[in-house]
Amino acid sequence: MEMLDPAMLAFIVFFGFMAAFIDAIVGGGGLISIPTLMATGVPPVIALGTNKMASVMGALMSFYTFLRSGKVDRWLIKRLFPLSFLGSALGVITVRLVPSEILRPLVVVMLIAVLIYSILKKDWGKNSTYGGLMRRMLVLSLLVAFSLGFYDGFFGPGTGSFLLFAFLTLGFDFLGAAANARALNFASNCAAMLFFSYFGLVDFSYAIPMGLAMIVGAWCGARMALSKGSGFVRPLFIIMTTILIGKQLLDLFK
């Protein structure tokens, strides 16, 4: 493992912290961490694998912080977590066979729909109305967890937004939705990280320092969300989803 010079180390540590801070609250940290890694000269496919390795470290911290706060629905997550993990593993395997870029136009449309709905429903997610799931909704939730896990392993952009939106539709407030979304994002990140590592697509000299910075950033982000509440999470979710749409449109027409 090569040693990074101090300037490069400071660069990836700072932006790793910022990526995990935002990702812990509403997702979208990859918009910061992946360009950061690519700016250092890391090849794109290695940047994706390295980012997953570092992101797992941050995702674990944010998941643990939300779990200890009581904002994670343990009963529900215990059932959804394995499906998200399995879906992501299959997504990573599939992306080696099928180009993931075919999804980009559909993802842009879906993100725009999520954004418009979130803006128009001003009181949506302000208070939690979740009181458990009937069998039909549980089955649907299992399918959504698997599908979004697969999507995260296959393509990835917007996974945090889609997960948060999914939990909002179940009746969680924005803070509860963010907490449970982090749990499933941790599951999908774990599976993707394992497969990227297996295929030798991780640069540990970048992944370890960035990951350590992400642990601190994720803790700070989760604590900030818990202290500020849903009123803080909602506008940040709208901002990050808007930025994500712009990034996907830029890549689509590039």
Image (cartoon, rainbow, N blue to C red):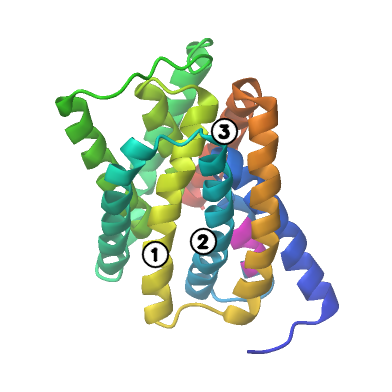
Residue 101 image-quadrant placement: bottom left
Q: Secondary structure at mark 2?
A: helix
| Amino acid type of the residue that numbered disc 3 sits on in the rendered structure | Thr
Q: Residue 192, labelled with which disc?
A: 1
Instruction: Give the crowd class for mark 2: few <14, some 14-19, many >=20 residues within 10 Å.
Output: many
Residue 228 falls inside the magenta stretch: no
Residue 51 percent location from the top left of the image: 55, 65
Q: Which corner quadrant holds the N terminus? A: bottom right
Residue 137 quadrant? top left
Q: Earlier in the sequence, mark 1 or mark 2?
A: 2
* Inter-mark Cα distance, 1 to 2: 9 Å
Task: Report if residue 158 is visible in the image.
Answer: no
Q: Under tag 3, what secondary structure?
A: helix
Q: Residue at x 49, y 45 (%)?
A: 248
- Nearest to N terminus: mark 3 or mark 1: 1
Query: In the image, which residues are magenta?
Result: 33-37
Marking on residue 242: 3
Is residue 215 at all visible to an observer of this figure?
A: yes
Q: Nearer the viewer, mark 3 or mark 1?
A: 1
Quarter of image, res 109: top left
Residue 56: assigned label:
2
Give the x, y percent position of residue 206.
64, 75
* Amino acid type, mark 1: Ala
